[in-house]
């Protein structure tokens, strides 16, 4: 066990944005508590950022400054490097590689780096007896990595699903509660700081997909495989879809889903309709949530803030405390050389039910044509909704299906879309029964 006579854990911090500054503030505010809990101090000895003169609300006068984070990783007298730069390539990747090559542990919040290079990083760290910790990379302040890797270590996990992006969850919540359309709510989210000036990383599902790839590796003991994740964002979700979802007993959420199937491992991010009584349906605003299905622990739900200086800094410092205590766990829960390759299950093999919204010309025979396209692909309709009549003009039609294969559903939709009676591309949202 560590004791009070141990030398401090010396750390160098690369990146002093919102999270980096938050980490320094937390370490200062909680210094006594942290020392009590890990038996030694955590001491910041060096930092690196793009602008030295910027006021970050923290005292940097007693730490060594580096303009170059890679040089800091190589030269600072530190035991550990905290990488908070972001991005899968460039300075972030080089800083982590240099830290490991020079015998330093790494703590990172960089989901993109881990999603693309995580297995390689784990192999490099473990071959040198070093730790790479990344609780802050997925779902901010929610201890989901520790929950899966340590709390459920005695379990076989068959499924992970969750709300992994607070920006999207905020937008979808506002659309549902206010009736406004996507573009209007997105503009508000940008004004409030919940969405970036260029929000595509969030709203197109890439951020959630990075996190899902990491979660799948930890949950299933497989190499990280971002390329296997099917990704679909929320741009096409309309305010009218929320009206229909409410009538049908659903909520709309952008979910990341990783599941073991008899065809391999599914990894997918896309809008879903989930039953209103599902636990995840009531998680609104900027909150994140993750549900794990385990064989002995059964279903476990984690909920909390997925971003922000405080929650993310809390996760970073929790990793620092573990390393200061001398705790070491394989990066993804299984030694890197024992991660078992998994066969990706293609999106076309997904089996489930579907919501489809069409804008069609209101004339005799149109509905029969839609039904025939479904029938020809062995797709069975469960519910059918049509609002009002407007002969020879456009009217919205909504249908839901019984369980069917994704490939069959896509073929049916292609046939329907080609009809002269269909005025715009069909809008489809997958239904998930949790």
Image: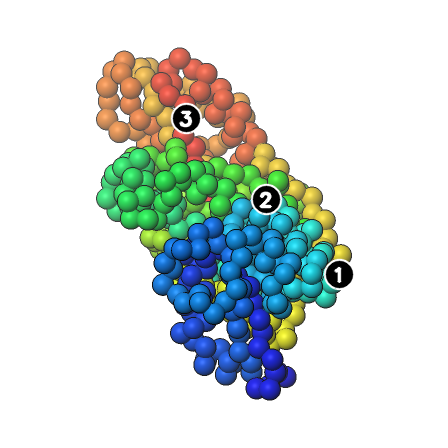
How far across and down, in percent of the image, does residue 338 sit? Answer: 75, 57
Mark 1 or 3: in front is 1
Q: Which of 3/280 is in front?
A: 3
How far across and down, in percent of the image, does residue 379 sit? Answer: 51, 30
| Residue 293 visible in image | no
Rendered residue at 48%/32% (across/down): 380
Give the residue number, with chain letter if any, for mark 3. Answer: 426
**Mark sitting on residue 127:** 1
- Left or right: 407 as drawn, with respect to 280: right
Rendered residue at 40%/55% (across/down): 53
| Residue 39 visible in image | yes
Rendered residue at 63%/61% (across/down): 75
Label 2 Cα neighbours within 10 Å, binned few <14 / some 14-19 / many ≥20: few
Determine whether 301 is above or below 211 in the image: below
Secondary structure of the residue carrying tag 1 is: helix
Q: CA distance from mark 3 to mark 2?
A: 37 Å
Label 1 Cα neighbours within 10 Å, binned few <14 / some 14-19 / many ≥20: few
């Amino acid at each position: 066990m560590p004791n009070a006579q141990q030398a401090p854990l010396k750390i160098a911090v690369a990146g002093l944005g919102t999270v980096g500054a938050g980490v320094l503030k937390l370490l200062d505010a909680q210094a006594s508590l942290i020392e009590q809990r890990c038996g030694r101090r955590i001491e910041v000895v060096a930092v690196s950022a793009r602008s030295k003169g910027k006021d970050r609300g923290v005292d940097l006068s007693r730490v060594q400054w580096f303009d170059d984070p890679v040089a800091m990783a190589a030269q600072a007298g530190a035991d550990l490097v905290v990488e908070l730069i972001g991005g899968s390539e460039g300075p972030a990747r080089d800083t982590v590689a240099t830290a490991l090559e020079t015998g330093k542990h790494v703590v990172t919040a960089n989901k993109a780096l881990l999603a693309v290079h995580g297995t390689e990083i784990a192999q490099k760290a473990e071959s040198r007896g070093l730790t790479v910790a990344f609780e802050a990379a997925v779902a901010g302040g929610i201890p989901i990595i520790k929950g899966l890797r340590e709390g459920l270590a005695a379990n076989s996990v068959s499924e992970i699903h969750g709300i992994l992006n607070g920006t999207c969850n905020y937008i979808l919540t506002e659309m549902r509660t206010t009736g406004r359309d996507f573009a209007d709510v997105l503009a508000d989210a940008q004004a409030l700081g919940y969405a970036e000036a260029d929000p595509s990383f969030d709203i197109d599902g890439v951020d959630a997909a990075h996190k899902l790839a990491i979660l799948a590796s930890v949950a299933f003991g497989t190499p990280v495989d971002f390329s296997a994740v099917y990704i679909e964002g929320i741009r096409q979700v309309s305010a009218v879809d929320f009206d229909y979802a409410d009538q049908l007993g659903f909520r709309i959420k952008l979910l990341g889903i990783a599941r073991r199937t008899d065809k391999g491992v599914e990894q997918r991010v896309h809008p879903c309709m989930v039953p209103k009584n599902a636990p995840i349906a009531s998680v609104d605003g900027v909150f994140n949530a993750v549900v794990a299905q385990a064989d002995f622990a059964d279903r476990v739900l984690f909920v909390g803030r997925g971003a922000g200086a405080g929650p993310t800094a809390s996760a970073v410092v929790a990793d620092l405390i573990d390393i200061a205590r001398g705790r070491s766990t394989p990066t993804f829960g299984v030694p890197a050389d024992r991660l078992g390759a998994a066969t990706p299950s293609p999106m076309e093999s997904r089996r489930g039910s579907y919501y489809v919204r069409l804008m069609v010309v209101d004339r005799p025979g149109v509905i029969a044509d839609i039904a025939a396209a479904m029938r020809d692909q062995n797709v069975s309709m469960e519910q059918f909704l049509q609002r009002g009549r407007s002969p020879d003009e456009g009217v919205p039609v909504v249908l839901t299906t019984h369980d069917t294969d994704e490939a069959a559903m896509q073929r049916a939709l292609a046939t329907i879309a080609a009809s002269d009676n269909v005025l715009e591309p069909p809008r489809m949202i997958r239904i998930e029964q949790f």
